[in-house]
Image (cartoon, rainbow, N blue to C red):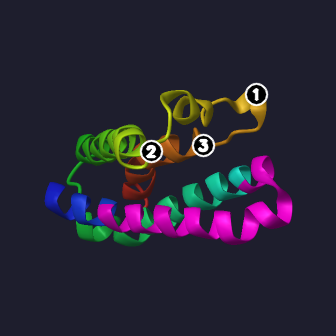
Amino acid sequence: MLLRALIVWLGILVLAFANGALREAILRPLVGEVLGRAISSVSLAVAILVTTWLTIGWIRPASSADAWTVGLVWLGLTLSFEFLAGHFIFGDPWRQLWAEYNVFRGRLWILVPLITVLAPVMTASSH
């Protein structure tokens, strides 16, 4: 189950990169930084939920505890990638990485880790 979950998470990572590329190439020039990031965060959260719904039968969590395990593993991988790769590979300052969580400044990124952890539980119950 966890190997299949890891494969799906890698697919979600590819979706996240594509989502970011679309944000930078299309959304940001059209609607600006704050709204572009908000739309991008919501669209990625929806993509994660749809991807999970389409693949949860293949991942095959046997129980709600297994679905929670998948969600928590995905959350750990996502946050690790976001902060470690964001800082050490892409060179983003820590302050900038944390700023994405400031909903008072129009940042909706928090939806992405929330959906990431909840999507397996939400979709497993529908299969």
Which secondary structure lies at badge 2? helix
Rendered residue at 79%/65% (across/down): 29
Q: Which residue is mark 2?
A: 118
Q: Is residue 27 left or right of residue 65?
A: right
> Is residue 127 among what the camera can see?
no
Callout 3, which amino acid? Trp
- Badge 2 density bin: few <14, some 14–19, many ≥20, Cα 10 Å: many
Q: Which residue is mark 1?
A: 104
Q: Position of residue 68 (x, y in %)?
A: 31, 41
With respect to residue 112, does 10 lie above or below? below
Sequence-wise first label, 3 or 2: 3
Magenta residues: mostly which secondary structure? Answer: helix
Q: What's the amino acid at mark 1?
A: Phe
x then y, percent, for residue 69: 25, 42
- Quadrant containing the N terminus is bottom left
Provide the residue span drawn in magenta.
10-36
Q: Which residue is mark 3?
A: 109
For the point 23% across and 46% down, the residue is 66
Mark 3 or mark 1: which comes first in sequence? Answer: 1
Q: Disc 3 and disc 2: Cα gap in Å? A: 15 Å
Query: Which amino acid type corresponds to the residue marked 2 in the rendered image?
Result: Leu
Give the label, 2 or 1, closer to the camera. Answer: 1
